[in-house]
Amino acid sequence: MSQHQVISFHYHLTDASGTTIDKSDAGEPLAFLSGSGQIIAGLESVLIGMNIGEKRKVEVEPSQAYGEKDLGKIITVKRSQLPEGDIKPGDMFRGHNDDVVTVTAVNGDSVVLDSNHPLAGQKLIFDVEIATKRAATASELEHGHAHGGDGHHH
């Protein structure tokens, strides 16, 4: 295989307590171009070494996923600084730097916002199966992502 591969895989992602976070659509594997940063490093490094049809449980520590939770990215703002309407924990907004912030608490006129990735600080557990692997095309390398089997998709 070339240094860069297009790998498609089925996955079921859970947190450490076994709660499902995400999974590939029924029958549709997720495809990525290795080395492009499209998936977390801790998962990519394992998938690269697997063979077509191989299944494996992969545990990824926060340092190889979305990092540890940075307490400096958690701030409290006045309710008046946010859009009008009902605001509750779990709501998400686009911040000033185009960051996505999540409301974690509402205490009267104060709202706690967290701009960490929602999965920061969590160990992620993937059950994966490799569907296909192939060398990346020149076009995929140029564009920095995998293309579909029948040509270019954006």
Image (spheres, helix red, strand yellow):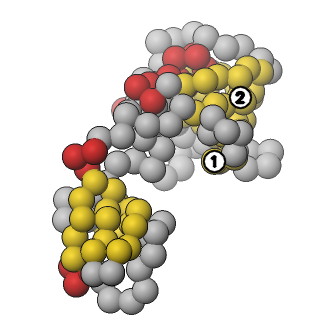
Q: Give above or below for 11 relative to 47.
A: below
Picture residue at 28% right of the left edge, 54% below the top: 74
Looking at the picture, tell me which residue is in the foreground, 119 or 3: 119
Residue found at the far front of this picture: 108
Q: Which residue is mark 2?
A: 128
Q: Which residue is mark 1?
A: 21
| Comparing labels 2 and 1, the label whose residue is closer to the camera | 1
- Secondary structure of the residue carrying tag 1 is strand
Residue 8 in view (yes/no) = no
**Quarter occupied by residue 60:** top right
Pointer 2: residues within 10 angstroms few (<14), some, or many (20+)?
A: many
Looking at the picture, tell me which residue is in the foreground, 3 or 115: 115
- Marks 2,1: beta carbons within 8 A: no
In the rendered image, the quadrant that contains the N terminus is top right
The numbered mark, 2 or 1, whose residue comes first in the sequence reads 1
Picture residue at 71% right of the left edge, 28% below the top: 128
x%, y% of residue 95?
A: 25, 65
Pointer 1: residues within 10 angstroms few (<14), some, or many (20+)?
A: few
**Quarter occupied by residue 114:** bottom left
Q: Give above or below for 154 relative to 18.
A: below
x%, y% of residue 11?
A: 70, 36
x%, y% of residue 73?
A: 25, 50
x%, y% of residue 71?
A: 28, 45
- Secondary structure of the residue carrying tag 2 is strand
Q: Give above or below for 134 relative to 99.
A: above
Looking at the picture, tell me which residue is in the foreground, 53 or 45: 45
Q: Label 2 amino acid?
A: Val
Picture residue at 63% right of the left edge, 35% below the top: 16
